[in-house]
Amino acid sequence: MVVLLSFPLTVTTGCGKQDLPEARQTPERPLGELRLAMRKQKWAEAWQYSDAVLKAHPDDADAIASVAMVAQHLEKPNEVADLLTKACSVESFSNDGRVRQAMIALVGAGRLYDAIDLLEETIEAVPSRHGTRRWLYDLYINSGNRAEAIPHGRTLVRQRQFDTKLLLSLGIPPSAKDDLGSTLEMVRRNPDDKRPLLRQANKLLNSGEVDEATELLQQISGQHPEFQPAQLLYAMALAESGDIDAYEKWLSEQDTSSLDTKAEYWIAKATIAAAKKDPQDALRFYWNASQRNPDLTKPWSSILELANDLKIDSPDQISSITDRLESLQQIRSSMERFDQMGSISRRLATDIAVELEKLGRLWEAEAWASIAMTLPRDDTVDVESVRAKIVGQLTGQTPWQVSEGRPELQSELPIEFQ
């Protein structure tokens, strides 16, 4: 996102703002007059024809883009962004270069979520646009909105449009050292949209600064009450703080049917249940969270703790949960070491593939094995046989998460736990 903020929109030299001349009578051929003024670099004169051009050529993407170029020279960032977005729309998002220009203009104006909406529309119109999907994935990740990013990342992996950076960002949540510069700059440029602050709120909550996170999430939700990622994080912050009354008030204002599929919703409910000294409800809610997102460690570790407290006797189920938790922890540790060592260790990449295969995340496992095969040779690592084993289990119908043979992956709370 930092790159986008500094990327030049057009290959032109800026001339700064100019005083606009008095309006002239609308010419018969406004587009011709506008482009003549552009060739003479008389940008303010060209701008006086803009409304007439847009009225005369509402479905001409190139004409609209010409007006956008004039706006760029007159330092009108929001007009540039709106015009380029309109140009993309009228040509059904078929021009990849124009979509990129519009995205850069929107981000440059601080309109991060408008840029995201543009890219969502583009890949809905042309799902095979892998590069555009990757821009969208990166914007979501940079905004702290992993929930929306992950499905696009998984699609890219299944379509074999991955690299090491993508695989690492899929596997490792943001750390406390996460640089917030670009998202803070978004809000500085466009204070009417605080949604990019979600990334800062995530960081605060992960660092244990619960009160600060709660206050920031109140600001985001107050401005954008429909923004579900902030609402869910707000619920988790309230639960973490132990403020049961505030959580209950929040819950009473929500359409819970729209939250049922979200792990964060169930983690917050489980945390509140534990605060109310209701371990059986907490166990049930954590189980729901684990099935909504089996890649999170928090639900699994909490289930094990509660099962121990409740003296639940289910050795097979406990063993499968323990194995899954250990694999998740091992994967994160290996990914962090792989990243710190310059992303060149064939052994670590292979180890990650092996653990992912154990979890039933076969598409991701195959991607890591493929990456491992491109890394400096290590004769002690037989990555070829690891990849062959994974590929032998893959078909076009293989889901992202294979649940067969994994007793911890069942939608209902096991009878032994009830």
Image (tube, rainbow, N blue to C red):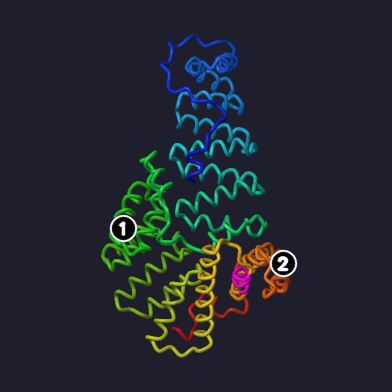
Give percent across and percent down for residue 137: 55, 52
Q: Residue at x 34, y 74 (%)?
A: 273
- Per the rendering, the mark at residue 417 is none
Horizontal and vertical percent position of residue 314: 49, 88
Using the image, determine if residue 226 lies above or below residue 329.
above
Residue topped by disc 2: 395
Structural distance between the alpha carbons of marks 2 and 1: 44 Å
Callout 1: SS:
helix
**Helix, strand, or loop for circle 2?**
loop
Q: Main secondary structure of the magenta part?
A: helix
Task: Determine the residue positioned at 50% across, 20% down.
Answer: 51
Q: Is residue 160 magenta?
A: no
Q: Is 345 on the left or on the right of 139, as rendered?
A: right
Q: Badge 1 is on which residue?
A: 214
* The C terminus, quarter of image: bottom left
Residue 353 belongs to the span the image colors magenta: yes
- Comes first in the chain, label 2 or label 1: 1
Amino acid type at mark 1: Thr
Q: Is residue 387 above or below residue 116?
A: below
Label 1: how many Cα within 10 Å (few below 14, some 14–19, many 20+): many
Give the percent coordinates (x, y) of residue 369.
66, 67
Residue in the picture at 58% in, 11% down = 28
**Three-letter code for the amino acid on which mark 2 is drawn:** Thr
The stretch in magenta equals 347-354
Determine which quarter of the picture holds residue 188: top left
Q: Residue 291 location in percent, x, y?
A: 51, 71
Looking at the image, the residue that sits furthest to the top is: 25
Q: Is residue 179 above or below residue 314?
A: above
